[in-house]
Image (cartoon, helix red, strand yellow):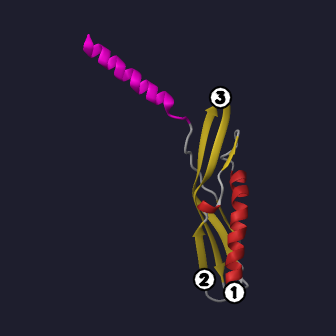
Amino acid sequence: MARTWLVLLLILAVAALALMVPRGTARAQRLEFASPSDTALKGSVHRVQADLARNVDSWHGARDCGSPARARAALKPALAQWLGRRMTDRPMQRLARWGYHSGEIWHEAQVIEGQPQCRAGFRRVIAFAEFR
């Protein structure tokens, strides 16, 4: 009899843990863009790149946090600032190509007090610029 109660208690504990785990968390997707290369520029290519994930704020909303458009909107200010600084660092070189690619975008969906909510952000997003 004691063994039956122990097994029943173990099953209830596992079921309670399964219900506590949030559903739909940490779904990842990639985002990338590269400008066309300026073929008129000649010379050796100097590539500069950096991880901008710490400079990009996470975003939140009701449903569409995983949207690539929302991710791009969050990335644009940090990317523009970084690219502008790289261009002023190299006044004698011309920008031949630029772009970015994300290692992944994290996305967490939750239901809080009956309302769906989500948060998302970049785990890693590499911006690059090629100068000639």
Compared across the picture, whether 105 is left or right of 91 comes to: left
Q: Are marks 1 and 2 in contact (CB under 8 Å)?
A: yes
Q: Are marks 2 and 3 in contact (CB under 8 Å)?
A: no
The residue depicted at 63 percent of the width and 32 percent of the height is: 112
The residue depicted at 60 percent of the width and 77 percent of the height is: 48
Q: Are marks 1 and 3 in contact (CB under 8 Å)?
A: no
Callout 3: SS: loop
Query: Which badge, 1 or 2, comes first in the chain's sequence?
Result: 2
Callout 2: SS: strand
Q: Amino acid at mark 2?
A: His
Q: Is residue 47 above or below residue 111?
A: below
Q: Examine the structure image and report whether residue 121 is included in the region drawn in magenta.
A: no
Q: Using the image as rendered, state which of residue 87 and residue 98 is in the foreground.
A: 87
* Residue that numbered label 2 is attached to: 46
Q: Which residues are magenta?
A: 1-23
Q: Main secondary structure of the magenta part?
A: helix
